[in-house]
Image (cartoon, helix red, strand yellow):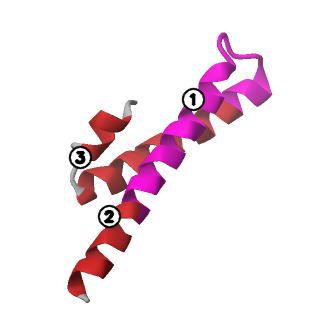
Amino acid sequence: MKNSEITGLSQEELVARIAEETENLVKLKFAHTISAIENPSRINKVRKDIARLNTEVTKRKAQSATETK
């Protein structure tokens, strides 16, 4: 997921996407524990996507806090 795609999402969509990606990460880790998955680098990609989404949420919260002051 690119940053341009992330900035286009609303706050609710970001939260939903974080939940979705977190669930996906758990499933990938479980599948990798049971047997080796075809592409283990997908785990890192999903982790980085979650971090990007969380960063955008934090950035928006900080921006809204400075606007209300």
On whether residue 38 falls in the magenta region, the answer is yes
- The residue identified by callout 3 is 9
**Label 3 neighbourhood size at 10 Å, few (<14), some (14-19), many (20+)?**
some
The mark nearer the N terminus, 2 or 3, is: 3
Q: Position of residue 53 (x, y in %)?
A: 43, 48
Q: Position of residue 36 (x, y in %)?
A: 76, 16
Q: CA distance from mark 3 to mark 1?
A: 19 Å
Q: Amino acid at mark 2?
A: Arg
Residue annotated with mark 2: 60
Which of 66 and 41 lies nearest the eye of the viewer? Answer: 66
- The image shows residue 10 at horizontal and vertical percentages of 21, 53
In this picture, is 26 found above or below 19? above
- Frontmost residue, 27 versus 58: 58
Query: In the image, is 10 to the left or to the right of 60?
Result: left
Q: Which residue is label 1 attached to?
A: 45
Q: In the rendered view, would you say 66 is above or below 48?
A: below
Chief SS of the magenta region: helix
Q: Residue at x 66, y 10 (%)?
A: 38
Q: Magenta region: which residues?
A: 30-58
Inter-mark Cα distance, 1 to 2: 23 Å
Label 1 close to label 2 by CB (< 8 Å): no
Quadrant where the N terminus sits is: top left
> For the point 32% across and 64% down, which residue is it?
60
- Secondary structure under the numbered disc 3 in the rendered image: loop
In the image, is residue 37 above or below residue 15? above
**Residue 24 is at least partly visible in this image:** no
Q: Quadrant of the C terminus?
A: bottom left
Amino acid type assigned to the residue bearing label 3 in the image: Leu
Say which label, 1 or 2, has the lower sequence index: 1
- Taking the spot 64% from the left edge, 31% from the top edge, the residue there is 44
